[in-house]
Image (tube, rainbow, N blue to C red):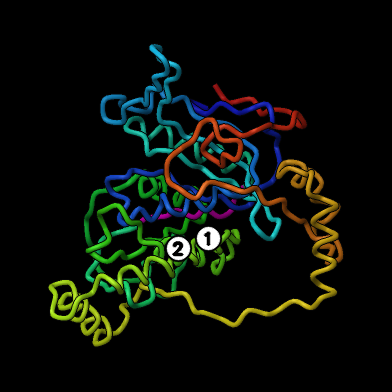
Amino acid sequence: MHYMRFSEAAAQIEVPCMIMNLIDPLVDAGDTAQTAHASISSLDFVEMGKFDSDPLFDYRAQRPIITYHDGRIEDVAVPEIRLSLVTDVLGNNFLYLSGQEPDFRWGTLAEDLLQIAEYFGVKRIFTLAAMPAPVPHTRPADMLLRTTTELENVMLGKVEHYGALADYFEFFAGKAGIDVTNIRVRVPLYLAVGENPFISGALAAMKMIATLGGPTLPLGDLEQLEDQQNLALTQMIEAGSEFEILLKNLEEEYDRTPLKAGLVKNIDTETDIPTSEEIGKAAELFLSMRDGSPLDRAQRKEKTLGDPEHPRSYRPRRGRHHYSEDRNSSTSGPGTEPDTAPETGEAPQPNE
């Protein structure tokens, strides 16, 4: 490979799904991708490798962060791209590519990503995006789906737009026969830029990943933040204010116009309440496997896969719920330094 360097923890295991979430804050409408990353970072993970930053980033465009302490420069943090093996809330493993969107060498980086997909046997890749749109926050967040395979509900037409690395990679992944699904959230214009992320949009995208057969991601904290954000926005509305008029017009237009082909919304379903026996079994299984890492579970999957009495469990890790990296945090998630990495498995040898 050109820029990927695998960690000692990496081993040749089969991981059928990957989420690709490389962020450029300037085009991340409503901080949607960053919000999703904050939630995914709370999951248990093992770092599988990272990319060499020097040839990929323009340090004048994405400047390193310097830590000053008592008269000295204590640390220098450069933008990074990391590959992690993550366990979702149902105990299933997936690969997570996180970090900043690079400035240079997209072509050779796409080649590396295709080799990673082949090495781990990845069959399905999800990418996240967001775009400003004339929609109100008082209606369920909708998304535009795009895929390299057949899609029944497709938006007809032709349009040109500036692309992200995820778009660029999707083009070549499609030629290689890899199933890539892009989930693009429509963000209300008044939430596209600012200090407050569009929580509903991130939630919608994460739910859609699970609906389409991808990982089941943690939603609880985001659902609470969504309620708080909706309450705060409601309190901002004053009778006769410009915001109230704008919101009313957006609602009327949204309700009057049928949902266009290619746009989808999540369908809320009733949650099945588990019995006390099911809760007890889940608790026993959780306690018996809580010391395992995602890599451990992947390496012994043949003992659990297909056995309904012994499904793979997960060990949740309390993660950060803000959007800045804390390099010294002991609860860092994918995209930051892990606490420890098991030394099991042979590290793959990158192609020269």
Observer-nearest of 308 and 17: 308
Would you say 139 lies left or right of 6 here? left
Q: Position of residue 279 (x, y in %)?
A: 79, 70
* Residue in view at x 17 percent, y 80 percent: 239
* Residue in view at x 42 percent, y 46 percent: 323
Marker count (numbered) = 2
* Position above or below: 69 against 25: above
Q: Which residue is mark 1?
A: 221
Would you say 30 lies left or right of 341 here? left
Q: Name the element at disc 2.
A: helix
Image quadrant in which the C terminus is located: top right
Q: Main secondary structure of the magenta part?
A: strand
Mark-to-mark CA distance, 1 and 2: 6 Å
Q: Which residue is mark 2?
A: 225
Q: Position of residue 40 (x, y in %)?
A: 54, 51
* Residue in view at x 22 percent, y 64 percent: 189
Q: Position of residue 136 (x, y in %)?
A: 27, 74
* Residue in view at x 52 percent, y 63 percent: 209
Would you say 1 lies left or right of 193 here? right
- The amino acid pointed to by label 2 is Leu
* Mark 1 surroundings within 10 Å by alpha-carbon count, few (fewer than 14), some (14 through 19), many (20 or more): few
Q: Are marks 1 and 2 in contact (CB under 8 Å)?
A: yes
Q: Is residue 128 magenta?
A: yes
Region in magenta: 122-129
- The amino acid pointed to by label 1 is Asp
Q: Quadrant of residue 108?
A: top left
Q: Name the element at disc 1.
A: helix
* Mark 2 surroundings within 10 Å by alpha-carbon count, few (fewer than 14), some (14 through 19), many (20 or more): some
